[in-house]
Amino acid sequence: MKYKPIFITATNTNVGKTYTMLKLIETLSARGLKVGVMKPIETGVQDAPLDATLLFETAKHFHPGLSCLKLKDIVPYTFELPAAPYVAKGRKRVSAELLESAYAKIEVLCDIVLIEGAGGLLVPIEDDLYMYDFIRLFGARTLLVGHDHLGCINDILLNLHLLDALGVDDYEWCVNFRENRELFMKTSYPFFKTLFGRVLCIQDDSDAIIDSLVRP
């Protein structure tokens, strides 16, 4: 059975999108699904795209059928400058058609494809293309990853309000514990629990996240 792809975004850069991708690859593969990965754009690339390489090698470990693909299929655009693609690409243009073609090569080999964004939802790519446009471009469900330090309430709610304003209604969110889980439980968890009834974290709740997003 084919499932809609999942677009993994975050409240900002360096929050844990790649880590979340790796957890989902493992969990989905344990359910017997053939999982593909894609990182349409990676910036800050010196010699090789580190995030895309890690994702590709991990995915191939669980799904050897991906070995017929090349790394360039997984990450069609790489730029050296560690900046938003709009800046990092210089005079080059990011083609939505090329991204769709790369996705099609992956999708045909898999039951589901995980797509990692760069930075957050409002990161600019072209004058008329932002990171959130990948949700529509790939017909994806969305997972928002939030950080765990003070300020996460504001950051997560801003992103959820943006998704709602964009008309995205098929999404889930979770927290990635990287700094101080105990502090999060004291300062942020009570509000999230009251507002949403539950708080998922990628460390403990990957199965629940998948149950929410992976369905016919």
Image: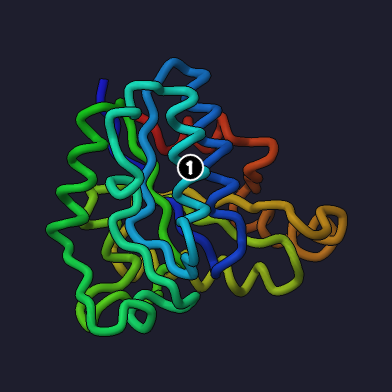
- Image quadrant holding the C terminus, namely top left
**Quadrant in which residue 76 is drawn:** bottom left
Q: Of 122 and 87, which appears nearest the observer? A: 87
Give how far across and how far down residue 19 sits, in percent.
59, 47
Q: Quadrant of the N terminus?
A: top left
Q: From the top left corner, tell me how far across and down residue 200 is, in percent.
A: 63, 44
Q: Is residue 136 left or right of residue 29?
A: left
180 or 73: nearer the viewer? 73
Q: Is residue 181 visible?
A: yes
The residue sitting at 37% across, 83% down in the picture is 87
Residue 67, picture quadrant:
top left
Query: Residue visible at 39% across and 29% down?
Result: 35
Residue located at (49% from left, 66% from top): 46
Q: Which residue is tagged 1? A: 55
Is residue 198 something that shows in the picture? Answer: no
Q: Is residue 113 above or below residue 92?
A: above
| Residue 122 vertical placement versus 163 (above, below) | below
Residue 91, x across and y down, in percent: 23, 84
Q: Which residue lies at the image location 39% right of the left edge and 21% below the top edge?
A: 64
Instruction: Using residue 21 as the reference point, say whether residue 175 is left or right of it.
Output: right
Residue 200 appears left or right of 68: right
Q: Which kind of residue does numbered mark 1 sit on?
A: Leu
Image position, residue 204 (x, y; %): 69, 36
User: Which residue is nearer to you in this view: 127 or 42?
Assistant: 42
Residue farthest toward the top in the current orientation of the protein = 32
In the picture as drawn, the residue positioned furthest to the left comes out as: 97
